[in-house]
Image: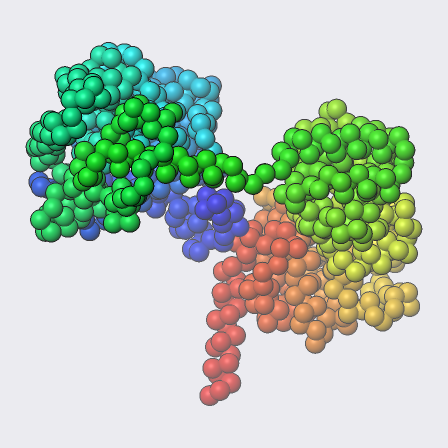
Amino acid sequence: MYAQLCKRLSEEAPNFEPVPNPCTFRLLLLNKCRAEFENRSKAFEAFERDGPLAPEEEERRQLSKRKMLGNIKFIGELCKLEILAEGILHSCIQQLLQKKSGCSVRDRAEDLECLCQIMKTCGRILDSDKGQKLMDQYFQRMAVLADNQDLPLRFRFMLRDAVELRQNKWVPRKATSTEGPMPINLIHDEDPRGRVVKFQLGSGGVPGGGSIMYGHPLKRGDVGDLLSSYPLSSSSFPIPSPNDKFSFGGNGYPSVYGRQRQRQEQNFYSGGGRQNFNQNHKQNHNSNSQQQQQNFNNSSSKDLPPRFKNRMLLTSSQGQSPEEVSLRPAANSLSNQVNSKPPMGLNSGRPMGLMSDPLMAPPSLKTSSPLLHKEQILIKQASLDRSKSGKKDKGPTKDEVLKKIESLMEEYSKTNNVKEALSAYREQKIPDRFISQVLLTIMVQTLDKNDSARELAGNLIVELKKETLITSAQFLEAFNELVGQMSEKEKEIPRIYSYVAGFAAHSVSNELASLAEFSDVTENGAHFPLFMLILQQLHKTQGKAKLTQIFNDSKVNLLNMLPEVDRTKDRLSEILEERGLSFLFPLLRIQSELWKQLQADPNPTTFYKWIRDNLEPSHHTDPGFINALMTVLLQYITQESIGTEAPGAVPDKQLLEKEKGLLEKFKLVLQAFLHDHLKLQVIAVYSLQVYCFSQQFPKGMLLRWFVNLYDLEIIEEEAFLQWKEDLNEEYPGKGKALFQVNQWLTWLAEAESEEEEEGED
């Protein structure tokens, strides 16, 4: 969004300095981007020192990093919009890949992260025929760096992601699940032996072994780096998988401990006694916990996020270890609520059909008896069954609903009975979230059929609205979706624009939607000529008088319905004439008649008299008439003096004097309609702007006319200054116009202020 804003500003923002010292927005933007890129590492210098950072410092460091990567992405987006040349991006990439003397690979990690961000943002643009050889060299170097063991593991995976992105033709890899976190039992990885290890839920719901980073399988040697950087705590450290036969026992514990525990369980269930088993189990757990605590204390806390560091400080100040806090259940947990009733459904001391391990609670839970946990499991299972049995029916899926609607429309096309179709629609009880898709299906299904089928579909939609089964907003949502599909279906259905316009015209005629609402879809010439086709369909079905009323009530600006290159009154007049819609814009017809009158008799007095005799007085203060009058006089004076003016050429002095003389000749005509009407004078300035825009802004023409209109007292200084500050997108070319006359307007404002000061004195 910001890159698109800069694109528009670079095209329309004026120059702030004289020509010898340009200071355009684009130049300022490029200088700022270069400064941010060259100074990207200075923000991290304050945090480069021995020892861990305080939580506040770590947060500031992460904020600086996000800002740096955001700037890099912004630079890439500017390249995609052609504001920034591709050669600049290649220079940036080469600088990021360049080896620095006395700098290790690990120290270059931040630069490599910026490199990956550039490739992710605009790599597809850079990987063209022109830059393909350079890109090959970049990615060869990135592939080598991805296998460098000195580089932190996260950055190696990041480089592999970028390499794979190019191998996949710059199509990003889609996530497995689009909503919520990915289930841990779906994540796969690769262990040091090259086998795939699948995450499984271990005892107590704790995830089993394996790891995943950036979606890449771990290579030999990566697991050690991963475990050394993993924040170790009893709640987050991965417990080995029960299915791992290489290094783990069958119960999800290391093999020696697992075999020992299996023997203890056998003794327990064969009558060996619970007391001995509990004692041995507690001893083994204590030794295992001590080993994990020792590993935790030996590991560096430098890589821990601030929230884990705060938790460590809090627990240590209370005399507790982080393990005990993370594994101890809450006071209201089911494991602390002992039920006096015996558990149901036990077979030889085991819960039925849930889990094979009778001791599912983590070792640090203080329970009075193994039977307590069995009862807890049964309680959870019962509540799970109740939730499943009590789950509400979600109703039909979208595909099922759309299939039924297709069958309904086939039957409706045979019977032509709209009442039966409405009754069948009611029986479907369609959820509100599917209604827009249903309406889209009704329209799409008839696009390749005859006019009567489309009319039936339109009648059904109107009746659905009358019966309050649908809303206007739902229909407009479906219509917008249909408009978005037109370009794809145009090859199969050549007249799809006319058919879609027919649905819109039918809905306007039956007050399902307004003409102004459809103009929002086609604003700024989008999907041209769809809006003109809607007007033609309304003219065909409603007639000239009704369409004129509908159009006038909508207050739609027809110029905004045209593409920017055609957004002139002359072009609009031609389009309306071609489509038989010129009656909608009578002032355009007036402009044509004014031009014919000037060609027949260019005498100003005769011209003024003809206007008075042929136009109603109400038109004399109409902005449309002022626009037409100013445009006609501009065309005539330019044709009779300068002729066809080349954009970069400067006319001779004699031609310029003739131009001013003709303007002075028609001075009285313009003053008769513009005098004491400041708003109409602003419209006249806009007319001059649009005319220069249609002529591709000949050099000096706009400034020349500004000066002449001011000197001849046709346009007052207040009108010029009001035009400068006015924001009106109806008239194209405002940015370039301001660029050409900005200096003169500044002079005019200063001269006016000086006159006011002299008057006060």
Judging depth in this view, the residue of 659 and 192 nearest the camera is: 192
Judging depth in this view, the residue of 131 and 600 nearest the camera is: 131
Residue 198 figure quarter: top left
Residue 112 figure quarter: top left
Give coordinates of residue 453: x percent, y percent. 86, 33
Q: Residue at x 14, y 18 (%)?
A: 260
Give coordinates of residue 307: x percent, y percent. 22, 46
Asked whether residue 577 appears in the rendered view, the answer is: no
Give coordinates of residue 451: x percent, y percent. 87, 34
Colour treatment of the image: rainbow
Q: Is residue 245 left or right of residue 439?
A: left
Asked whether residue 40 appears in the rendered view, the answer is: yes
Q: Residue at x 80, y 28 (%)?
A: 448
Residue 254 figure quarter: top left
Q: Is residue 521 left or right of residue 226?
A: right
Q: Look at the picture and state if 190 lies above or below 5.
A: above
Q: Look at the picture and state if 609 lies above or below 57.
A: below
State how many labels appear. 0
Q: Is residue 10 left or right of residue 690?
A: left
Q: Residue at x 19, y 39 (%)?
A: 368
Q: Residue at x 86, y 32 (%)?
A: 413
Give coordinates of residue 231: x percent, y percent. 20, 35
